[in-house]
Amino acid sequence: MSGALPGHLAGRGQRGAAGVRFAIVFVVLAAVLAVAFYGVDAYAHSRVEREVATQLQSELGTPQAPAVEVLGRPFLTQVAARRLGEVHVVADDVGQGNDSVLPIDHVDMTLRDVTTTDWWKTMNVARADGTALVAYDALQRAAGVPLTYAGGGRFTLEGNQRLYGLTVQAKITGRLALDEAKQTVSLADPTVEVAGYTLPDVVAQQLIKAVVQPIPLEGVPFDLQVTSVDAQDDGLHVGLSGTDLPIRR
């Protein structure tokens, strides 16, 4: 009796072996395509981040390109649509290159729904939110008076002041209040001491208006609106927000 398998069993075995080979080839091919797609996706992601960073450096006036992270994967679908869902931007020394009135030490922003028609040379941002840190010496220069941070969210101004036609040595303290409509900050809740005597609120308010003019918050990135101010030990923390922002080189 021969040891060969019957014909129908041999055919079934050959088909099974062919199926295994096909499955192996399919898995290998899928893995190669996945690796290739990941590589192309990663390259496009890195290139767009560099392009956006270059564009934003010009707009922000920073000595170094900002750190840019485009969120969301796969990335090629965003490239095809020419629309980035969310871009995280971190930059230092904002406004140093364009004579900004109020230079900003540090800014941390998220740009949402960023669209382009020319490979990120120009962009439009549907919405942006973030925070900025302003050094107190920059704030003092913008104020034009020796306003110094005294801690606890309050500021101090000391020196000779004119009061009812007299020159007096006064110490003025107050907190910064934001006028969101005018995009200025000014001293609020003031106390004024002259020769150790605290002046009545009405007199203090009048002296504040004469001595410390509202400080314009100019030089904010992308003309974002300042929505909040918070004086802390390391500087003035500023909340930023805006919609429909064009970015042009």
Image (spheres, grey):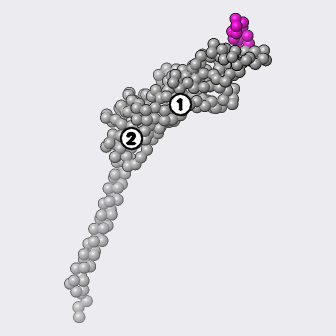
| Residue 116 drawn at (x, y percent) | 34, 35
Q: Secondary structure at mark 2?
A: strand
Quarter of the picture containing the N terminus is: bottom left
Magenta stretch in the rendered image: 159-169
Residue that label 1 marks: 227
Identify the residue at the far bottom of this view.
1
Q: Which mark is residue 84?
A: 2
Mark toward the viewer: 2 or 1: 1
Of residues 179 and 72, the one nearer the viewer is 179
Which residue: 32% across, 42% down? 81
Q: Quadrant of the C terminus?
A: top left
Front-most of residues 29 and 171? 171
The reply to whether residue 187 is visible in this rendering is: yes
Q: Name the residue located 57 percent from the left edge and 26 percent from the top edge.
A: 178
Whether 148 is drawn above or below 36: the answer is: above
Report if residue 85 lies within the magenta region: no
From the viewer's perspective, is residue 203 above or below residue 57? above
Residue, x 29% and y 69% (percent of image)? 21
The image quarter containing residue 29 is: bottom left
Q: Main secondary structure of the magenta part?
A: strand
